[in-house]
Image (cartoon, rainbow, N blue to C red):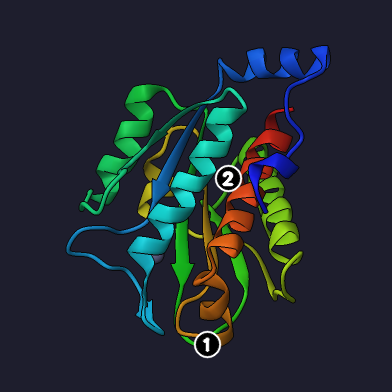
Amino acid sequence: MGLASLPFAGSAAQAQDLSLNANRKIFLDPGHGGHDPGAVGNGLREKDLTLDIAKRTRAILDDHGYQTRMSRTSDVHVDLPDRAAAANAWGAHVFLSIHINAGGGTGFESHREVNATDHTRRFNSTVHRRTIAWMRQTASITDRGTKETNYVVLTHANMSAVLTENLFIDNEANANLLRSPNFRQDIAIGHFYGVDTFFN
Ligand SMILES: [Zn+2]
């Protein structure tokens, strides 16, 4: 699915939305990197997939006027607390960490910290709902739900923070989806709509 299929500026109302987005800071955190490949399976490495999906997500957010930063834009290692610290120092409004799951399951899940604020719970549910909806345009995807987990990046971030686990790299059917650039674009569009729906 290409950008051309996304609703875009053209009406006055949408132009107004875009100007509002210019004040919204979205921090994207592609999981792992450098000497840490993350999960590996079926010829894929988590660190490559997360960077690709985050870059695709960033491109769509940029096209819609959001301010964006990433914890890494290449194959380098960044310590977990430093990822959250970068978002805190920038004054990000939301933090979105992108991962791929492993361990014998199938499907999509997302996480927020334990005892998260209502604001964060709403961000989590919006990102979750939108992302799985876009994945399901291509394939039947198991919904593993939203979970509360005190991952370092979630607890260290000062703003609403969500971590997505986008299918299982060690599941052959899941991996075949993740191998497809079109499917990774759908994941990115889902993450974009999660952010955009949350703010607008
Ligand atoms: Zn991971």
Reply above or below: 123 against 19. Answer: below
Report the quarter where the N terminus lies. Answer: bottom right
Identify the image quadrant of residue 166: bottom right
Is residue 147 visible in the rendered image? The answer is: no
Q: Who is closer to the viewer here, 65 or 82?
A: 65
User: Which residue type does callout 1 highlight?
Assistant: Glu
On whether ligand 1 comes within 8 Å of the CB at mark 1, the answer is: no
Q: Residue at x 74, y 76 (%)?
A: 140
Reply above or below: 164 against 87. Answer: below
Q: Which disc is residue 116 wearing?
A: 2
> Mark 2: which secondary structure?
loop
Q: Residue at x 67, y 44 (%)?
A: 194
The residue that disc 1 covers is: 172
Reply above or below: 3 against 181. Answer: above
Residue contact between numbered discs 1 and 2, judged by CB atoms under 8 Å: no
Going by the image, does 130 lie left or right of 155? right
Residue 118 x/y as whole percent = 67, 39
Q: Which disc is residue 32 wearing?
A: none
Quarter of the displayed picture in which ligand 1 can be seen: bottom left
Q: Residue at x 58, y 37 (%)?
A: 60
Q: Residues within 10 Å of mark 1 (few under 14, many from 20)?
A: few
